[in-house]
Image (tube, rainbow, N blue to C red):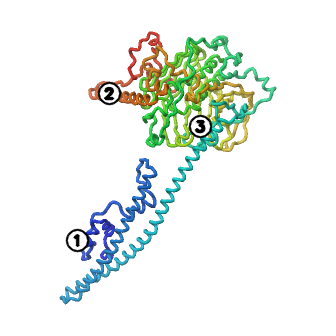
Amino acid sequence: MKGRGCWEPGTVRSFCNSGCLSKLNQGQYSSYSSASGGDSLHTPLTPPRRKTSACHLLHLVCLGDDSGDEEPTTQSDRSEGIQGTLKTLISKLDDLSTCNDLIAKHGAALQRSLSELEALRVPVEGGEKIKGVNERATLFRITSNAMINACRDFLDLAETHSRRWQRALQYEREQRIHLEETIEQLAKQHNSLERAWREAPTLSVNTPSSPTTKKGGSERPQKGEASDEDEDTEYFDAMEDSPAFITVTATENTQHRCSQSNLCGVSGGHTNDWNQDNVSPSCKDSGKELQPLRKRRSRIPDKPNYSLNLWSIMKNCIGKELSKIPMPVNFNEPLSMLQRLTEDLEYHELLDKAACCENSLEQLCLVAAFSVSSYSTTVHRTAKPFNPLLGETYELDRLDDLGYRSLCEQVSHHPPAAAHHVISQRGWTLWQQITISSKFRGKYLSIMPLGAIHLQFHSSENHYVWRKVISTVHNIIVGKLWIDQSGDIEIVNHRTKETCQLKFSPYSYFSRDVPRKVTGVVSDSGGQAHYILSGTWDDKIESSKIVQSSKGGSGSEGKQKTVYQTLSPKLLWKKYPLPDNAENMYFFSSLALTLNEPEDGVGLTDSRLRPDQRLMEAGRWDEANSEKQRLEEKQRAVRRRREAEATDALDNGREYDGFQPQWFHKRKNDITGETTFVYKGGYWEAKDSQDWSTCSEIF
């Protein structure tokens, strides 16, 4: 009898819609078919099933809908969705109750009809058939009673849990509202405490392990500013085999024995602090500053105080490439990425002195200090620079006072890439191609510079190569923005194979180390360490000559540490103090204040001539936003035209070169094996003759 006395699965559920129920009550479903393939068991015809069942709705309420929709929803949207689900569930329970009543009603009617039929006088063959139908009706009644009891239990349970779910939903809504209010209150208290801390007098401690704290210069992030990520977070790009060591200052007698080979240092960038013993005679006069031909500006208009709804802009930015998001100038500073790249030359005098060093290891120490000094301007600079337009250039001609010329050009737009070339009259040349990859991940912003930096000294032909570390901007949503640098830099002298391993320690709430700590070891081609570098990337770097090394005990991670006995540290680099009123001028350094200063004779594509950036610097942000949109739309139109030309050339079998930079061309580097854009010459000659006929009009 299995399968002959049961309704097909889903029959009752398929009736749970208002149209079918009304028709069933009116007796419109009078035709019958067999659930067992033409047998004599009568079951109602099954109407089309609905896509959303009561069981699925129960699952949605209990577990939530994980259907893969990645669009962000607000709390009100989620609450309305849950309320709608509960209402639908209640209506489905009402339908189920109606089905329950209908089964009981029509089952009783069927039993009465069969009893009346059995009482009639019919032939023997007809009586046997009526008896069989009666038996099947009895089985149907038993099954229906079981269905009715199960439905009744389900209804009771659903009604009980429905009230419980509603109470739980209300409690969750209240808890979320309370949590939002608490976070907002904490953020306000955080900002108040920060203001009070900045205004309160601080005690400066000037020791090697605790750098001097200066107003507006090297404030350390407090515990309240700490990110909730630790060293295991993905953006901490640290090498697993980074050196672990302990330094011990040697005794006074040892210092006297080894003082002849100690590294000369610089304090605050002044040349008279250098020990001239290791400087070649031809370089002693080259370190003197030349007389500038013009006076540079020392201030820009104060930053306006414009309010901005952060959520309205950021909610659609999560997971997207930052360079592809139309951002208002409220998030920018009035400098382009090309000018920020030029800011790496703030402490160029380190390279001037390195060019005069006869000892390549001492030269490597100064190059390492220069690589760290480029991050000192970022400690307060959390604003985003302008993305350069394709073909945009920036020159910095400081031959008259600093002895170098710098040229940058935007050589690619997606991904954004800039080529940079610097040549100095004091014996060195620097070039690089940097591609910026940035991701906004909700709580923080990761900025990953890709590309190698090359530095070559003319007299010794020492060729150094290194790469930048990852920059992370924290507290994007709540709290005060602050920036951290983390990862490792390996500087290699490809002529002598000498190396310097620098480690930028990420900030951690539980760490006892000095914030923004940088440590490093300078080794020869055989791997023997000669100098220890220590300091912070926002304040200073010192070097200590190693006189003896020995193996120490194992550290907390089981790695054996090396104990270095060193001489007293010598200062290599010290950060310049910020100008007065720097907090109202985007925390620009003295060099940064001059980068966007109008200058005659520059190329037609120079960043100084960019109108939206100029309007923002003047404080006219509304006009700057309109101008920024115009420039971006103009650039998109040019890109669409190039794509059409490329398609047309492909259809006609012609070659299409696409965009070609004006002053740089692609070449393969023999050392790294990478194909990058390098300076091909001609810019400074064009400036001398003021012939800019080959420049395109991008503004």
In the rendered image, which residue does mark 2 sit on? 641
In the rendered image, which residue does mark 3 sit on? 239
**Labels 1, 2: front one:** 1
In the drawing, what numbered circle is on residue 28? 1
Q: Are marks 1 and 3 in contact (CB under 8 Å)?
A: no
Q: Are marks 3 and 2 in contact (CB under 8 Å)?
A: no
582 or 292: nearer the eye? 582
Residue extending farthest left: 123
In the drawing, what numbered circle is on residue 317? none
In the image, residue 206 lies at what x, y percent? 72, 31
Q: Residues within 10 Å of mark 1 (few under 14, many from 20)?
A: few
Amino acid at circle 1: Gln
Amino acid at circle 2: Arg
Residue 675 seen by the camera: no
Q: Looking at the figure, which quarter contains the N terminus? A: bottom left
Query: Label 1 vs label 2: CA separation?
Result: 67 Å
Q: Looking at the figure, which quarter contains the C terminus? A: top left
> Which of the two labelled residues, at mark 1 and mark 2, occupies the earlier sequence position?
1
Q: Residues within 10 Å of mark 3 (few under 14, many from 20)?
A: few
From the viewer's perspective, tell me whether residue 656 is left or right of residue 202. left
Secondary element at image label 2:
helix
Secondary element at image label 3:
loop
